[in-house]
Amino acid sequence: MNLERYQLKAEESLMVFEFTSVGPKGSIRKLVRYSETNLKNLYNLAFGDKDSVSGDINDLAVSDNGDSEKVLATVVATVYAFTDKYPEAWVYATGSTNSRTRLYRMGITKFLDVIVKDFQLYGLNNDEWELFEKRTVYNAFLAKRKI
Amino acid sequence: MNIEELNKRKVPVVIIDNSLEKFKSLPLFQDKVDKANEMLRTVGLPKPKSKHKIAK
């Protein structure tokens, strides 16, 4: 998956990453956050735009900065970095809207052959986890690094 | 290792910036975490070795 991606910054635990999207709309700072859940070793992955004035994070913003593939590749890079540090971690992700979940599914599908070499990848379909398959609609995704 | 080779690495080079520490204590994306917890409560985790649909 030799995609262009942005330079990442993170604090030492690699639970919070930041990068800057650069495009026609200017420079937009993005924050990626891994949060603990009620299940041990399972982390929620979320990301959104960081307001440069208030510092608030908005995961509903549509940046339209012409770099969605590069942004997704950068977020995927955080999954590699995070699971390198926490190899037992499960990473759960879903879009903040149905269309965004669909976008993620399309991105995963595009690089599925590479992703499955490194991750066990599941999709949530009718309240059941199943191994991710192309052309299937999923509500959420779950990944665990292959050790 | 040059920039091109670095970009090809799956595990990225990450610059440590401790100013990001403050975000660890903030309830960022808490609604998504709450929804994830609700879903996980009923669905749980898959069984890693299963090849087809995973039973709850």
Image (cartoon, rainbow, N blue to C red):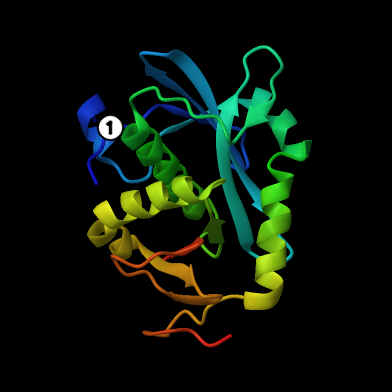
Mark 1: which amino acid?
Glu
Given residues A4 and A9, the one toward you in this image is A4
Q: In this view of the protein, can residue A39 be seen by the observer? A: no
Q: In this view of the protein, can residue A80 be seen by the observer? A: yes
Which residue does the image show at 71% across and 39% down from the upper left?
Answer: B28
Which residue does the image show at 25% across and 52% down from the upper left?
Answer: A110
Q: Chain of mark 1?
A: A
Which residue does the image show at 23% across and 61% down from the upper left?
Answer: A113
Which residue does the image show at 40% across and 64% down from the upper left?
Answer: A137
In the picture, the quarter occupied by the C terminus of chain A is bottom left
| Position of residue A122 measured from the top left corner of the image (x, y, whole percent) | 44, 69
| Position of residue A98 measured from the top left corner of the image (x, y, whole percent) | 50, 51
A70 relative to A90 in the view: left or right: left
- Where is mark 1, residue-wise? A4
Circle 1 Cα neighbour tier, 10 Å, few/some/many (<14 / 14–19 / ≥20): some
Secondary structure of the residue carrying numbered label 1: loop
| In the depicted structure, whether residue B25 falls above or below residue A25 | below
A49 relative to A35 in the view: left or right: left
The quadrant in which residue A88 appears is: bottom right
